[in-house]
Image (spheres, rainbow, N blue to C red):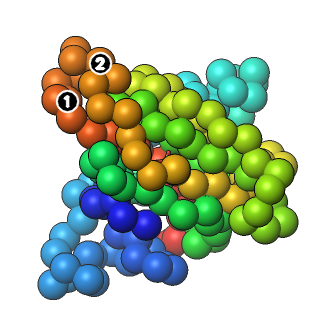
């Protein structure tokens, strides 16, 4: 992993969620905003074709990752949550190659997908614990200037931590 990360709601460090940023002097964690939960609910409703699944979705943490041109993220599973609720991923800025694998191990078979600014990707059902990662090298100049980002890529993943 070579991204820069900030969290909302709960702070994530390998391999746990905490109420404060334990690796940054116990700094407070910014709250998880209602509008972002609404976006997550809309994404799940659309991906599942099921308004009830969307309405039931209650994310309480977001990891926000910034990728510069050199950044990558190795193949991993999102499994530090005490919940199998979907993970909703939103991409903003430069296009990347997202590698979507299988649930058994970090090897092939996997599918490489270009994630562009504005793309939403939902990990749910049998794909919830699929290995995934980002290939090194976002594609400079491919973002949408209307986002206000001049360089790099932001990825937000919305999660249900299952924490009390
Ligand atoms: O940047 C991405 O599209 C993937 C992010 C990711 O895998 C993660 O936050 O666990």
Residue at the top extreme, as displayed: 146
Residue 42 seen by the camera: yes
Q: Whole-Å distance between the Cαs marked 1 and 2?
A: 8 Å
- Closer to the chain start, of discs 1 and 2, is 2
Query: Which residue: 22% across, 57% down?
Result: 30
Q: Which mark is residue 149?
A: 1
Name the disc covering residue 144, or none. Answer: 2
Mark 2 lies on a secondary structure that is loop
- The percent coordinates of residue 58 (x first, y second) are 54, 46
Residue at 62% in and 65% down: 76
Q: Which mark is residue 81?
A: none
Give SS at disc 1. Answer: loop
Q: Residue 83 sits in which quadrant?
A: bottom right
At x 15%, y 84%, the residue is 25
**Res. 38 in view:** no
Q: Report x, y in % for residue 79.
A: 64, 68
Q: Quadrant of residue 133?
A: bottom right
């Amino acid at each position: 992993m070579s991204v820069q990360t900030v969290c909302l709601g709960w702070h994530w460090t390998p391999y746990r969620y905490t109420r404060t940023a334990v690796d940054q002097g116990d700094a407070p964690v910014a709250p998880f905003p209602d509008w972002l939960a609404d976006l997550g609910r809309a994404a799940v409703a659309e991906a599942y074709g099921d308004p009830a699944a969307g309405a039931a979705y209650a994310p309480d943490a977001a990891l926000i990752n910034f990728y510069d041109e050199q950044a990558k993220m190795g193949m991993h599973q999102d499994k530090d949550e005490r919940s199998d609720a979907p993970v909703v991923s939103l991409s903003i800025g430069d296009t990347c190659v997202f590698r979507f694998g299988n649930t058994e191990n970090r090897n092939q078979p996997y599918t490489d997908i270009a994630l562009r600014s504005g793309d939403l990707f939902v990990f749910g059902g049998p794909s919830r614990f699929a290995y995934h990662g980002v290939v090194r090298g976002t594609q400079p100049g491919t973002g949408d200037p209307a986002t206000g980002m001049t360089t790099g890529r932001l990825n937000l993943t919305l999660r249900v931590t299952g924490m009390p």
